Amino acid sequence: MRLLLMFYKSIKREHGLPLSLMVPNATTAKAIKEAKAGKGVKKFKNAKDLFKDLDI
């Protein structure tokens, strides 16, 4: 019973379900998988190097 009460309170607090029901499409899922594997990910020592790479 307490678990149900906690669930209802979180619904009220979040103004909806307290969990994400979003499922990424195939393109996004592929990009997430590649990024987690480090494919195509650039790493920089500091912000200055990042901005230089971005031509900012």
Image (spheres, rainbow, N blue to C red):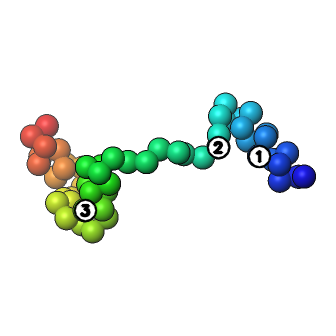
Cβ atoms under marks 2 and 1 closer than 8 Å:
yes
**Relative depth, front residue between 51 and 30:** 30
Counting residues from the N terminus, which is met first, the one under dot 2 or under dot 3?
2
Residue 17 found in image quarter:
top right
**Residue 2 placed where, x, y %?**
88, 52
Instruction: Identify the residue under disc 2.
Output: 18
User: In the rendered view, would you say 39 is above or below 29?
Assistant: below
Label 1 crowd (10 A; few <14 / some 14-19 / many >=20):
some
Whether residue 45 can be seen here:
no
Residue found at the far top of this picture:
15
Element under label 2? loop
Residue for point 16% across, 52% down: 49
The amino acid type of the residue labelled 1 equals Phe
Residue 7: mark:
1
Cβ atoms under marks 3 and 1 closer than 8 Å:
no
Marks 2 and 1, how far apart at CA: 8 Å
Marks 3 and 1, how far apart at CA: 35 Å
Element under label 1? helix
Counting residues from the N terminus, which is met first, the one under dot 3 or under dot 1?
1
**Relative depth, front residue between 21 and 40:** 21
Marks 2 and 3, how far apart at CA: 28 Å
Residue 41 found in image quarter:
bottom left
The amino acid type of the residue labelled 3 equals Glu
Counting residues from the N terminus, which is met first, the one under dot 2 or under dot 1?
1
**Residue 33 placed where, x, y %?**
30, 62
Residue 34: mark:
3
